[in-house]
Amino acid sequence: MSAATVLLAWPVRRWLVALAATVAFVLIVAVPTDLIDTPVFGREIPPTWWAWPSLLVSSALGGMLTATYVRAPSQPDRSSSRRGGWIGGLLTYFAVGCPVCNKLVLVALGSAGAITWFEPVQPVLQGVAVLILLWALRSRLLGELSCPTPVSGDVARA
């Protein structure tokens, strides 16, 4: 069995959680980065052509990753990896955001440095974010295939 096989065998409940989490990730990133225009947030530099597609990919991966934490009724929780997802989400936030609107980047590099140094790196950040989210999702899915390790009390009873 592969990670894709595990994914295809998900119950409807997991797919619904994945869908809800995907929508939540889109809103959590798109509103403060002003990809979705609101009167609360603004952008000095317009979004890049790749901002929405990359946000949707990262959000879908994040949604599926979140759904791996929903245990199937007939299966014990065997997934092992609990790292990686938050790093990919944070990198996506920095990648699709306005380079001069990000206060951390402005403090570290100034407005000229944000445009000169940070803006060209944003696509790389997004690529790394997607790779980390893919790795985390694959680890969680393959963890469902692994055999459970007996707890020390289980060994004593055996």
Image (cartoon, rainbow, N blue to C red):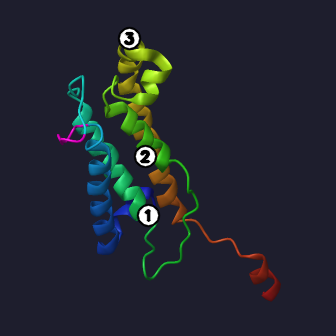
Indicate which disc residue 59 carries: none
Secondary structure of residue under mark 2:
helix
Residue 112 numbered tag: 3
Q: Earlier in the sequence, mark 3 or mark 1?
A: 1
Which range is magenta? 34-40
> Which quadrant does the C terminus fall into?
bottom right
Where does residue 60 sit, x and y in percent of width and height? 31, 51
State the residue position of label 2: 134
Q: Tell me the CA gap for discs 3 and 2.
A: 33 Å
Q: Position of residue 23 (x, y in %)?
A: 26, 56
36 or 152: nearer the viewer: 36
The answer to whether residue 7 is above or below residue 55 is below
Residue type at tag 2: Leu
Q: Residue at x 32, y 44 (%)?
A: 29
As shown in the figure, which amino acid type bears the numbered disc 3?
Ala
Between the residue at mark 2 and the residue at mark 1, the CA separation in whole angstroms equals: 13 Å
Please say if the residues under marks 3 and 2 sit with CB atoms less than 8 Å apart: no
Report x, y in % for residue 118: 41, 20
Look at the image and say whether residue 38 sits in the magenta stretch: yes
Residue 38 falls in image quadrant: top left
In the rendered view, would you say 17 is above or below 113? below
| Left or right, residue 29 beside residue 145 | left
Q: Look at the numbered disc 3 and give the secondary structure of its residue.
A: helix
User: Which is more foreground, mark 3 or mark 1?
Assistant: 3
User: Which residue is label 1 attached to?
Assistant: 68
Amino acid type for the residue under numbered disc 1 = Thr
Q: Residue at x 78, y 76 (%)?
A: 152
Please give left or right for residue 50 compared with residue 3 in the image. Answer: left
Pointers 3 and 1 in contact (CB under 8 A)?
A: no
